[in-house]
């Protein structure tokens, strides 16, 4: 007869097996989604290189898709073996142990992390509940890193097997957008099936989330009370959903680790938690925990018909009351009604916000009286409490808060019509408010932005004009606001000038690196003296890169400088016959003059130019005396042709760190760089989670930047097209230019800290929960 402990362990094992069965059945659909995507893009027009890459990806997938399916299924089954880890090892890595990382391993992990986050967005609620039940059964504080239930494990299986069957890594981005929604849907179904099995077996039929939230002394539930307006919470190292994520100011369920108080965590535990998943994923788990608590409270207080009754339209009395309230709020919410398309700039202070808050409370009381069902009363109350929290946020300027106030009734309409509003973090209404909030929470009292406030005003007025469209209008204006941010922040003030500069600098540095790579390939088998080889790699590739940026890739001057490289190589090869020596004597003065002109583009002083010319001239003298090896004319002709079209052979992949400083910016662009600071030192070696976090940073979010011992409040204003450079702008207009890898380093070291721990609506939800916990009767009263 089995013991109770054995029965409990068996239930957890069966839940995992059931999950694996469901996911395994979905693998053919994943393969089909990839096949459909690659076939659909096969004949899309584009550059010849892109079209060839798509053909290669399609061909490789057709050849290996069955093998990928079978190996993925086997790898999935292996996760059920004891002590399996996500890396496929039989034992878990020991904390603090140093290990060699294979080339490309970080890139593979980033690919898997992005796919896992897509799954987490769709399935976080079911995953959290399943995790709690399994941890309860196994008496764990968290799931092991290689547990098959974690999204990153499944994502890594798919990526690893994709590469193992020799499908190019470059093909993965082509299918990820098609693969992700299918995988998310199937894993959500698998999580639900495992949860239903455990509930039917009597395991935690009801989960008391509030009892699972454990906090250490001094940890605050809401925003830090002693933080000054506009001051970033640099000590917590945490972030909102727009800014990125947190690395540990909260514990318990909201941190994604079931009820584990930080007082029992050691340094190794904390480090492991920081690196086992992306900070953004952990922030989403915490936020999902907050909205999950709200949803369960509503289900508990209102009853099981909460979601069902939301599917029907509001009662006629409430509908009429909302229409009346909409008209009243427009004219009595603290801000004069202004028509037209102007900025709508009016003097607004704290008294207007108080007036708006009072008006909204009165409207909420009237709406609750008009409500005819418990669901309607609860929805009105929760939305009202959320907007009370938003209006109380003193770090948002009064003029913006009164525009936010006008959104309460449109948001209430959406909340009444759509059950998922209270539990879906990606709901357009939430995303819009969070996105606008992340941009304006960094304002200080002395800073104003008429253009941004005008855009917020326009967004609100569009929503008011189309109140019946609900989700659609919120999605529409959210997309428009995103487009506005993509240009507004990089086109205002000093940033507008330096964005163009930064783009040129990035292009030059990337071309320098890529020209060097390609030139090394061309000269690999040629007998070229070290002096000439070093000059080409250390000097002339920079000349070509600067010329390409300054004149253009196809400009005649750029082509002429490329020809100089071919002429130099010819002149440096042995000259055994008289005709070649006569030709060298004739061309040498012009060649040396062209070399000086090229070095002049780099700003080399005459003394430095003389040193390089002397080194090259000595080599040419040896060639004249046939003391160097000869290069065949065919090789030189091939080299010249390749150099003339060098940009056609440049790879698309990243090139690592760029050699940037203020002097190089001024040299490349001729622009005074005194108000732009290039950050190329500091931080710590970032792991793949921090790199993924850096990629997810949202334009417009505010951060605390600790640089050279000074804390700056900065806004993320621009990311280059290639994702190599980031620009942050302070309230004083000073620009900080940071490479992507350095951004990840600063995030990991806590030198770049998001100003907000949580998104605006998540914090408002938390505040609403605190008030309902203190006074539950107000929900239906």
Image: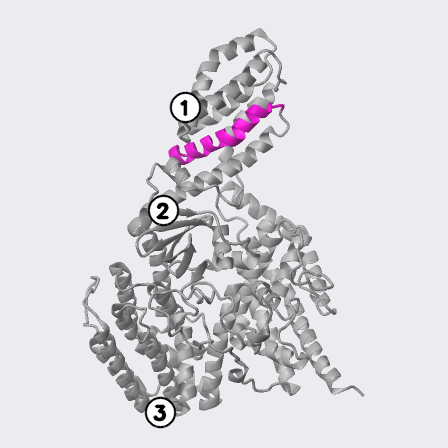
Q: Is residue 24 left or right of residue 614?
A: right
The outermost residue toward the top is 578
Q: Examine the image and state in which quarter residue 418 appears.
A: bottom left
Q: Examine the image and state in which quarter residue 670 appears.
A: top left
Q: Who comes first in sequence, dot 3 or dot 2?
A: 3
Of 111 and 372, the residue lying toward us:
111
Of 353 and 336, the residue lying toward us:
353
**Of the residues tagged 3 and 2, which is closer to the observer?**
2
Q: Is residue 57 left or right of residue 509?
A: right
Is 451 colored magenta in this rendering? no
Callout 2: helix, strand or loop? strand
Range of residues picked out in magenta: 527-556
Q: CA distance from mark 1 to mark 3?
A: 87 Å
Callout 3: helix, strand or loop? loop
**Of the residues tagged 1 and 3, which is closer to the observer?**
1
Of 275 and 632, the residue lying toward us:
275
Residue at x 24%, y 60% (from the top left corner): 450
Q: Which residue is mark 1?
A: 606
Q: Is residue 417 visible?
A: no
Residue at x 52%, y 73% (from the top left corner): 255
Q: Main secondary structure of the magenta part?
A: helix
Q: CA distance from mark 3 to mark 2?
A: 60 Å
User: x and y percent of residue 82 in the render?
Assistant: 74, 70
The outermost residue toward the right is 1
Say which mark, if any, is on residue 372: 3
Say which mark, if any, is on residue 676: 2
User: x and y percent of residue 226 in the render?
Assistant: 37, 73
Callout 1: helix, strand or loop? helix
Q: Residues within 10 Å of mark 1 (few under 14, many from 20)?
A: few
Q: Who comes first in sequence, dot 1 or dot 2?
A: 1
């Amino acid at each position: 007869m089995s013991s109770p402990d054995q029965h409990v362990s068996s239930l957890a094992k069966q839940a995992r097996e059931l999950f694996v069965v469901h996911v395994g059945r979905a693998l053919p659909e994943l393969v089909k989604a990839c096949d459909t995507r690659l076939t659909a893009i096969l004949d899309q027009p584009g550059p010849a290189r892109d079209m060839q890459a798509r053909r290669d990806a399609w061909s490789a997938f057709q050849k290996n898709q069955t093998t990928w399916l079978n190996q993925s299924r086997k790898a999935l089954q292996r996760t059920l073996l004891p002590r399996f880890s996500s890396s496929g090892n039989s034992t878990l890595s020991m904390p603090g142990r140093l290990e060699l990382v294979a080339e490309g391993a970080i890139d593979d992990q980033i690919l898997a992390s992005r796919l896992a986050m897509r799954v987490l967005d769709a399935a976080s609620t079911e995953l959290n509940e399943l995790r709690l039940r399994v941890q309860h059964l196994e008496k764990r504080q968290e799931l092991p890193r290689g547990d098959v239930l974690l999204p990153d494990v499944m994502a890594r299986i798919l990526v690893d097997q994709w590469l193992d069957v020799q499908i190019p890594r470059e093909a993965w981005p082509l299918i990820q957008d098609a693969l992700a929604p299918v995988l998310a849907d199937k894993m959500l179904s698998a999580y639900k099936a495992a949860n239903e099995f455990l509930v039917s077996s009597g395991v935690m039929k009801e989960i008391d989330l509030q009892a699972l939230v454990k906090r250490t002394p001094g940890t605050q539930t809401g925003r830090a009370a002693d933080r000054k307006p506009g001051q970033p919470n640099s000590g917590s190292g945490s972030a909102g959903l727009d800014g990125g994520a947190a690395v540990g100011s909260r514990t318990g369920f909201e941190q994604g680790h079931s009820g584990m108080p930080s007082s029992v965590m050691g340094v190794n535990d904390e480090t492991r938690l920081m690196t086992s998943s992306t900070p953004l994923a952990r922030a989403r788990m915490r936020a999902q925990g907050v909205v999950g608590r709200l949803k369960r409270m509503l289900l508990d207080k209102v009853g099981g018909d909460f979601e069902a009754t939301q599917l029907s339209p509001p009662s006629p009395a409430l509908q009429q009351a909302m229409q009346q309230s909409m008209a009243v709020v427009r004219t009595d919410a603290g801000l004069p009604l202004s028509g037209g398309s102007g900025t709508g700039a009016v003097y607004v202070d704290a008294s207007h916000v108080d007036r708006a808050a009072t008006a909204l409370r009165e409207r909420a009381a009237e709406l609750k009286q008009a409500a005819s069902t418990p669901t309607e009363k609860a929805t009105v109350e929760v939305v009202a409490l959320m907007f009370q929290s938003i209006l109380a946020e003193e770090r948002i300027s009064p003029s913006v808060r009164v525009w936010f106030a006008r959104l309460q009734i449109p948001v209430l309409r959406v909340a009444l019509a759509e059950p998922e509003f209270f539990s879906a973090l990606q709901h357009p209404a939430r995303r819009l408010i969070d996105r606008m909030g992340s941009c304006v929470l960094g304002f200080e009292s002395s800073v104003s932005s008429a253009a941004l406030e005008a855009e917020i005003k326009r967004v609100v007025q569009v929503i008011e004009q189309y109140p019946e469209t609900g989700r659609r209008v919120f999605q529409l204006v959210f997309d428009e606001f995103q487009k506005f941010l993509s240009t507004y922040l990089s086109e205002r003030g000093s940033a507008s000038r330096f964005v163009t500069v930064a783009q040129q600098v990035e292009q030059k540095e990337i071309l320098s690196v890529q020209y060097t790579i390609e030139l090394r390939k061309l000269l690999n088998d040629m007998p070229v003296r070290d002096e000439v080889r070093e000059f080409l790699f250390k000097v002339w590739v920079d000349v070509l890169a600067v010329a390409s940026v300054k004149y253009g890739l196809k400009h005649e001057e750029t082509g002429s400088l490329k020809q100089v490289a071919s002429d130099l190589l010819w002149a440096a090869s042995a000259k055994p016959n008289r005709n070649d020596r006569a030709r060298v004597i004739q061309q040498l003065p012009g060649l040396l003059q062209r070399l000086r002109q090229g070095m002049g583009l780099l700003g080399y002083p005459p003394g430095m130019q003389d040193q390089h010319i002397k080194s090259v001239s000595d080599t040419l003298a040896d060639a004249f005396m046939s003391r160097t090896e000869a290069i065949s004319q065919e090789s030189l002709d091939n080299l010249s042709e390749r150099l003339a079209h060098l940009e056609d052979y440049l790879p698309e992949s990243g090139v690592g760190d760029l050699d940037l400083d203020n002097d190089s910016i001024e040299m490349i662009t001729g622009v005074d760089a005194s108000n732009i600071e290039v950050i190329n030192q500091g931080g710590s070696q970032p792991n793949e989670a921090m790199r993924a976090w850096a990629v997810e940073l949202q334009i417009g979010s505010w951060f605390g930047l600790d640089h050279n011992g000074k804390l700056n409040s900065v806004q993320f204003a621009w990311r280059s097209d290639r994702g190599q450079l980031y620009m942050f702008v302070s309230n004083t207009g000073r620009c900080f230019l940071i490479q992507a890898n350095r951004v990840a380093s600063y995030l990991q070291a806590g030198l770049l800290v998001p100003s907000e721990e949580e998104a605006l609506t998540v914090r408002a939800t938390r505040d609403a929960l605190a008030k309902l916990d203190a006074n539950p009767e107000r929900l239906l009263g």
